[in-house]
Structure formats: C-alpha cells, structure tokens
Amino acid sequence: MNFIEELRWRGMIHDITPGLEEKLAASMISGYVGFDPTGKSLHIGHMIPIMLLMHLQRSGHKPIALVGGGTGMIGDPSGKSSERNLLSIEAVAENAEGIRGQLEKFLGFNGSPNSAEMVNNHDWLSKVGLLEFLRDVGKHITVNYMVSKDSVKGRWDQGISFTEFSYQLLQAYDFCQLYKDKNCILQIGGSDQWGNITTGTELVRRKISGDAFALTCPLLTRSDGKKFGKSEGGESVWLDPKMTSPYKFYQYWLNCTDEDAPKLLRFFTLMDQGEIAALEELHANAPHERVMQNALAKDVTTRVHSVQDCQKAVDASEILFGKGSTETLKSLSEDDFLSLFDGVPQCQIPRTELDAGIQIVDLVSEKGSLFPSKGEARRMISQGGLSVNKTKIDDPAFTVCPQMLLNDKYLLFQKGKKGYFIIRVA
C-alpha cells in the first residue's frame, strides 16, 4: 500500500514536506506522533493521528508513538487560548501508562521489523540540564523564527509564558533524539502542529545535518461548524469506557449527519474506496436507513471497544424502536439508561409505596399520571397496549414489586409504540 496515495484519497493530507514520497518509496522508514498525557484517556480527536500511524504501518513502515511524559509537564500552547495547569510527575506517568493499552487496539506491537514502538520523552528530557539545552539546542533556533509560528502568534497579545514558549524547542529536541536513536525521519500531526514539527525538521538539519520530514492532517470540523469530537452537551468523547460508555460512544458516530458521514468513514475506518462508494450509493437510494452511519458506528465501536460491547450498544439502541428485550434493558448501566431515555417524562414515588407491591392500574393512573383514569388504564392494559420494562402486561390486576426495578430505582413504561414514561423510586 502506498502511504501517501492512501492518505490523499481519504483527504487526510494538509501539508507535506518535499521529498517524503521518494523516501517512502526507497525503503522502510520510521515515523512518529506525539501524544500529550495530560488526561487519563485519549479521546476521539486523538484517533486521527492514530489512524495516520495505522496507515503508515499498513504501508510497511514503522510507527512510533511518543508519549510526552516530559513535555506533558509543560503544555503545548498550540490551539490554546490560555496557560494550562501543570500536572505532577506522578499524574503524567499514570496517564502515560494508560495510553499504551488504547494504542494497542490500533497498532501492532508484535516484534516484526515494522512493529509499533512506544517511547516516553521524559526518559531523555529529564536528563538534560538547562545549560546543556541552551547551548546544544537554543543556539540553533532564533527567537525571530519561534515567534513567527502560529502557536506563538495566537497567544502574543494576551501573553505566553517562557515555559510554553519553550515548548516548540522541546518538541524539536524530541525529533532530534528520535532521529539519532531510532532513525526516525518523519513526524506526523494535525495541521495546527505544522510550526512545531517544522521547527524539529529545522533543528535536525542545523544540529546534525539530517533530512527530516513533516506531514500534517487537516483539523476536522463538523458540517455545522462545531468542533469534531464533542458531544451535543459539549463533553469530550473518550476512548476509555469508564469515561464514555460504549453505548454513548456508539451513539456519537450513529448520530453524525449525512454530510459528515462520508468524511468520517474515510478518516476513521480502514474501508477501501470501493466499500465506501458502495455505502454512499446505498445511502443515496435509501437515506432513511442511515447505512453509512450504521457502518461507521459499528466499525469504530468494535475497534475501540469490542464486538460484544458494540452489539450491546446496538441492542440498547434498538430498545427505542421496540426491538429490545427486558434482558437488554436490565443490562444497561444507570448512565446508559438515562442517556437512552433522555427527555422522557418522569415522576417519582417513595420506596415505601412499592415495597408491599402496587397494582399496576393504581401506579399508572393515580401515582404515575400516565393515564387520566383507572378505567382508561384498565382498557389499555386489557388490550395489550402497556409494557413495563419491555414486558407486555395484559392483566389489570398485575402487581408491580421492587424486584422489577431497573438499577434498583427505575420502572420503564411504554404506552403504545413510542409513549415512554419513567417512574423513579426514591
């Protein structure tokens, strides 16, 4: 597979330094992406550079994931409007440890010649003294050159600390170190990283007379202009299932627009041109079936989580369309249950009223106000038009008991096909 051609048809190249294609064609090369370990998990915005490393490895080249255990203690000013809080050494190390497990779902750490490798820049940055750094690195890059970078210019008016100003030199030093130790000639990142990356190529040229290269990917935005990777509530969508459940993760992709789906399929899946073109054609013929969104959500959720987690998310989604079972409903976490039925009318009753059991007619009319009268409740129940926790009830004398509670506090009623109502037991 030709790495550059693959990225071109996917629309994943923003800038590239001259000569890289020839280097890639001549022999196996090593390329790296830096990951900032200031969070406990990577989020879906990080998946773009991860996918770039995947394509690099699939093309026969060696991917290196650099975890910024050292630079993460400083903070990259690129795209940031204010100074970031500095983390402790212990917190950064803990975050860095969690990243490898997430990367292993994308990259092959298998011992082959182009096996993925993970490095931590704390290993070398922590050993460099200030005088040594100023003498061996600082003298090669002028302040004029550094100030011209967008990451600095964007912060110039409101101020930038020397700490963050020095970040591009530290990142450039990383590139030099990997060039010398790992024969790594390529750094990959988002388009907002172009300034930092090219400072690295320049330092490699000036300090050790080497040829280093840069490749950046466009920053992804949604068709509505909003930043990609945030939920409607403004929350990040994380790869860690404890921070974003597989159900919420699946729903994020499933709910993308028709305009965004073709680009997301190209960026976040390994489907080839023919497969994506076929999905686009199917979608054009039957947009209501949302085949692109379904294929995207299943592919990405399976890769990040598992086949089982993806199927659970699919099953949970089908609950809204009347296809889910009682067992599926019981398997949902409280967070997923509330997300699934967000906006559904609710009422609350005290636990003591349910402990002895309540006849369903009383519960849905007097307590829950789902029906205006007991007579109407009896008629609907007798006709099979009411379900509790996805189980149809046809006996007006049926008694609801505490053992039926979901997550020990909820009862889900369904009146007709889509008339959902939740009773919360406090």
Image (spheres, helix red, strand yellow):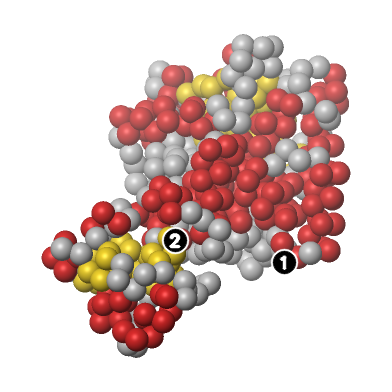
Q: Nearer the viewer, mark 2 or mark 1?
A: 2
257 to the left or right of 335: right
Q: Earlier in the sequence, mark 2 or mark 1?
A: 1
| Image mark count | 2
Element at label 1: helix
Please identify the quadrant where the N terminus is shown: top right
- Closest to the observer: 349 or 192? 349
**Residue 300, horizontal then vertical, whole percent:** 62, 43
* Residue 209 horizontal/vertical position (percent): 70, 20
**Label 1 neighbour load within 10 Å: few <14, some 14-19, many 20+:** few
Mark 2 burial class by Cα count in 10 Å: few <14, some 14-19, many 20+: many
Residue occupying the point 46% across, 50% down: 328
Q: Which residue is mark 2?
A: 390
Instruction: Identify the residue shown where x is 67% and y is 49%.
Output: 296
For residue 215, above or below residue 406: above
Which residue carries the number 1 mark? 288
Circle 2: residue type = Lys
Q: Residue at x 13, y 65 (%)?
A: 352
Q: Residue at x 49, y 50 (%)?
A: 247
Residue 208: assigned label: none
- Would you say 210 lies left or right of 22 here? left
**Amino acid tagged 1:** His
Q: CA distance from mark 2 to mark 1?
A: 25 Å
Quadrant in which residue 426 is drawn: bottom left
